[in-house]
Structure formats: structure tokens, C-alpha cells
Amino acid sequence: MILAIETSCDDSAVALLDMQGNVLTSQISSQTELHEKYGGIVPELASRKHLTTLPLLIRYVLGEFDIRLQDLQAVAVTYAPGLIGSLLVGVSYAKSLAWLAGVPLIPVDHLEGHLLAPFLDHKDLRFPYMGLIASGGHTHLVIANGLNDYKLIGKTIDDAAGEAYDKVAKMLGFQYPGGPIIEKLAGECEKPTIEFPIPLKGKKTLNFSFSGLKTAVRNKAIEGDLYVEKKELISYDDFAKWPESDKKDRVRDIAASFQQVVVKIIVQRFEKALKQYPMKDIVLTGGVASNTGIREGLQALAQKRQKRFFFPDSKNCTDNAAMIGYTALQYFGDRRFIREDHLRMNASSKSPIGQLVVST
Ligand code: KG4
Ligand code: ZN
């Protein structure tokens, strides 16, 4: 049995997996309520919250299956990348647990966790594949050749995809996280009418850019008197209660037109990258991979190019500890990856995967 801990950002997550990688339980304690009114994550509040939530969540998970420390064969923890205060809470707790249980502590890169997350739900996925990690902090296009063998071929030069969703939502007056709200609003607009520019159009790069698009959305919102500055941010349910009006439709139109461009950006990047790296399988993972519009866009591309397309179940797209436990298990027992002294292990705000050289 392996216990996995994930506290890299705003959610405390704990999972238990058997040594074959089957998930017995995967629990998440969300901090959304704490941060939503700020329109983004407040790092200091996040780490303080982990400090009180994580021990309770671990006690709950161990209690649920009547697991004692001596039943554990390993402890896994996200050590990078993320908010350093949040990571330190998880790492400190994991060190103590592993030491008490007398079992190995396996440090896991959060990005590698996302990249391998589709294996949790798709036993037929195989290396090598082309994967896009699209989350609130990262937009990394990676060739995954095998465990610990990744090549970063493109990344965002400014905002991450999820960050763009969150910022667009905030400027329209919506709470954090904005991704699921924008997706719902977009689904309520039959035909988006605004032509936002496609960033990096015509450029040779496999990189991504979202900040120009964000500015174009802001200008459109200001022009239509929909831009919200420093007001109380609202939820989707609050919006749903508004009486139907032209204003309501224009908010939906902006959301749908924005999402249409995001889908185009992602599909076009995959299409271009596949010409250079003709992989059989493509993967979309990270929080943004929950988005149905983006999934449909990539599904269509996969069909057109005769590729297989994989994405995790929605519960495994956003931050979770099951993907951390699964990744740790791939390293467990492999002598190539044994680290000498786990008690010396440290947290890091940067990921080695994020530091790989972009080759184009
Ligand atoms: O992977 P994740 O849970 O955390 C990070 O590692 O960042 O991703 C969170 C991000 C947020 O920016 C959130 O707005 C976005 O994923 N997100 C979505 C959707 N669900 C979550 N973006 C677009 N559509 C969604 N349905
Ligand atoms: Zn993440």
C-alpha cells in the first residue's frame, strides 16, 4: 500500500493505492471557498489551510480502510513545482510519516504526475506519446518517451491556459476557478460572434501565448461595458439567476468566442507538432483537460490524423494525489532512482521538466 500526498497549490489531496497502482481512495479537500472571492489563490492562506486540513485528511483516509502505519510500503509526495509554502507542508508531513513508518519516501514532480495521470484510467496507453499539460500554472507540450525521459517541445511564453481562463472569468466578474464557469457560459452560446486574434499565428514555434488574447478579451469587455473591476466576484449560480437580457447573452458570447480561440490554439499546436514528431498517441492532461470543447477539438484532430487520443477522467485532470501515487509507484523499487537520504529531500518551486530545453 502506498500513501500519496499532494499540496502543491490550493487543494490538499491524499490517496491510497495498492502496489499494482489500483486506487483505493483519492480524497481532495478543496480550498476554493477560501480563495474564490479574491479571483485567484492567495499563497499565504493556502499553506496555512494545508497545515490544518492535511493531517485530518490523512487520518480520515487511513481510518476509512483501517490502515496502520506499518501497513504502508511507501509514502509519495509532490516536492515540485508549486507554491513553496504549500509544498513544504506536504513534504514535511510526508517525511515524518515515512520516517515513523520506516518506509521509503518517494518525491514526485507534479508535472510528471499530470503527464502520467491518463494511465490511471487507460490501461492501453503506452509510451511514447505527445502530451499537453494544461493547468493553472503550466502549458507544457511534451514528448513522453518513457519514465523520466521527457522532451519539452513547447511551452507558454506568458500566461498558462488555465490562468487565461481564470483571468478572463475575473474580468467578467466571476470567481476563481474561472475555467469551469467559462466552459458553462460558452455552452450557452449557440454561435460565438467575436473574432479574437489567434496568438503567434504564422510563427514557426510550438510555443503558446495567451496574454494577447486576454488583452483582446479585456478590450472587448470594456467596449461592451462588461468589464468588472474590484467588485464582488460572483459564481455561475449567481449569474444563472440574472433575468435573461442582452447583457447576459453578450457575456456568454465573449466566453464562447474566447474558448473557440483556445480550442483553435491547442488543436493547431498539436497538428503542427505531429508533423515534426509523428506520434501514434496524443494526451491532454491537467485541470484544463476537463474542458469538453478542447477535448472535442482534439478528438476530431485525432480522428483526422488517425491517432489515439487519451485524457484522464475529470477527477484525475485537476490536482489530485492518485496521479502522484501512481507516478511514485513507477519509480518504486527501481534501483536507478533510489535516493540516498530522504530526510534531506527538499521542496522546490520549479520543476525539472519545466527546465528542459525547448527544442524549437
Ligand atoms: O491542474 P490544476 O487543478 O491545478 C494546477 O496545477 O494549476 O488546474 C487548475 C486550472 C485552473 O486554472 C482552472 O480554471 C482550470 O484548471 N480548469 C479549467 C476547467 N476546469 C479547471 N479550464 C477550462 N475548462 C475547465 N472545465
Ligand atoms: Zn496541477
Image (cartoon, grey):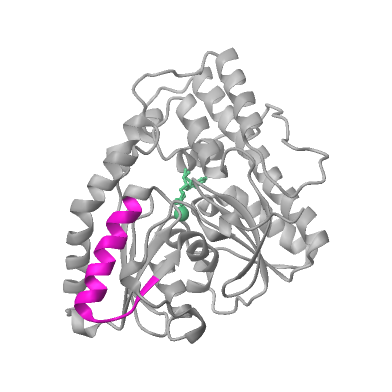
Q: Nearer the viewer, residue 300 or 65?
A: 65
- When asked about the image quadrant of residue 105, the answer is bottom left
Q: Is residue 160 visible?
A: yes
- Residue 13 position (above or below residue 42): below
Judging depth in this view, the residue of 141 and 88 nearest the camera is: 88
Q: Quadrant of the N terminus?
A: bottom left
Q: Is residue 231 above or below residue 356?
A: above
In the shown orientation, is residue 299 left or right of residue 32? right
Residue 105 colored magenta?
Answer: yes
Q: Give the camera-side residue of 53 and 149.
A: 149
Q: Position of residue 74 (x, y in %)?
A: 32, 79
Is 296 in the magenta?
no
- Region of the chain picked out in magenta, as a range: 86-106
Look at 37% across and 33% down and name the residue there: 235
Q: Quadrant of residue 177?
A: top left
Q: Residue at x 57, y 22 (%)?
A: 218
**Main secondary structure along the magenta-highlighted residues:** helix
Is 4 on the left-hand or right-hand side of 334?
A: left
